[in-house]
Amino acid sequence: MAGRPPEVDHVKSAFLKELKAAEDLVRKINSFKGGINPNGTPGLHPKYVRQVVELAFMGAVSSWEEFLERALVRYAAGAKTKAGHSPTPKYGCANSIDHAYQVLSGNPKFDKSKDYLKVSEPKWVVNTADFLFGAHGFGDIKTKSQLLGHANSIRNRVAHSSDKCRSDFKATAIDFLQPQNGKLTKGYGPGDLLMTQVIRHFGQPAVQAQKTHFDAYMDLFKQLANKAVP
């Protein structure tokens, strides 16, 4: 007798909880930036505030990729949301989560302790969903693939200081900010960009609300997650 299909709602709930924790951390750390706070207590140097924002963003991007992986493998194994939503399988469902990993990776010997799915690549996510399902909620990832690629560039620059990571981040920051001379100020880093207000790419509502790039990305991740797991 076949077992019950895996559940998927808790995957989104866990992801949204991680995003809220990141947002709460950034909100709290921002209240400590500067020299001396109004109540007379010492504030944190802006450098350390930026570092915390960077780490919060890096964690959010990692949580986003984990969400994609967990949702995809569960849908491939026949999961449905509590509201009854499930992508329409083209070729039937995997018989377990382990089997789903094998199907998604194309590797019958897939080992979660050694191998990984390419969920950091928006094109792979959408192409895989298109291949497996006739209808699914991952389509918006394709339309937002450029922004998601920029998120990876920001995350990678936080984690690494290689020439490639520096170059990719510089290209992202210039694309977002459109500086008149096409150059960034010396030492401009991911924390600076994440705490700067949006001027393009995220839509006029984000611009009018004076959202920072950090907040705009948190909103984007939530929107995409709600489409994938409605």
Image (cartoon, grey):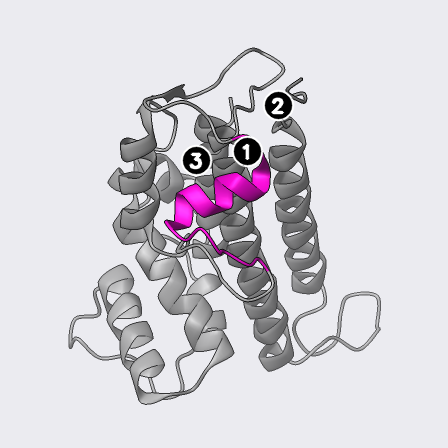
Q: Is residue 100 magenta?
A: yes
Residue 61 to residue 10: above or below: below
Q: Please name the residue that numbered disc 2 is placed on.
A: 5
Q: Nearer the viewer, mark 2 or mark 3?
A: 2
Image location of residue 106, percent across then percent down: 37, 49
Asked whether, in this view, residue 135 is left or right of residue 7, the answer is left
> Callout 1, which amino acid?
Arg
- SS class of the residue under badge 1? helix
Residue 182 to residue 198: above or below: below
Q: For marks 1 and 3, give the CA distance.
A: 17 Å
Question: Are the residues tagged 1 and 3 within 8 Å (C-beta)?
Answer: no
| Quadrant of residue 51 within the rendered picture | bottom right
Q: Nearer the viewer, residue 217 or 203?
A: 217
Question: Are the residues tagged 2 and 1 within 8 Å (C-beta)?
Answer: no
Residue 142 to residue 177: above or below: above
Magenta range is: 95-112
Q: Please name the residue that numbered disc 1 is placed on.
A: 74
Q: Nearer the viewer, residue 62 or 206?
A: 62
Q: Is residue 38 magenta?
A: no
> Callout 2, which amino acid?
Pro
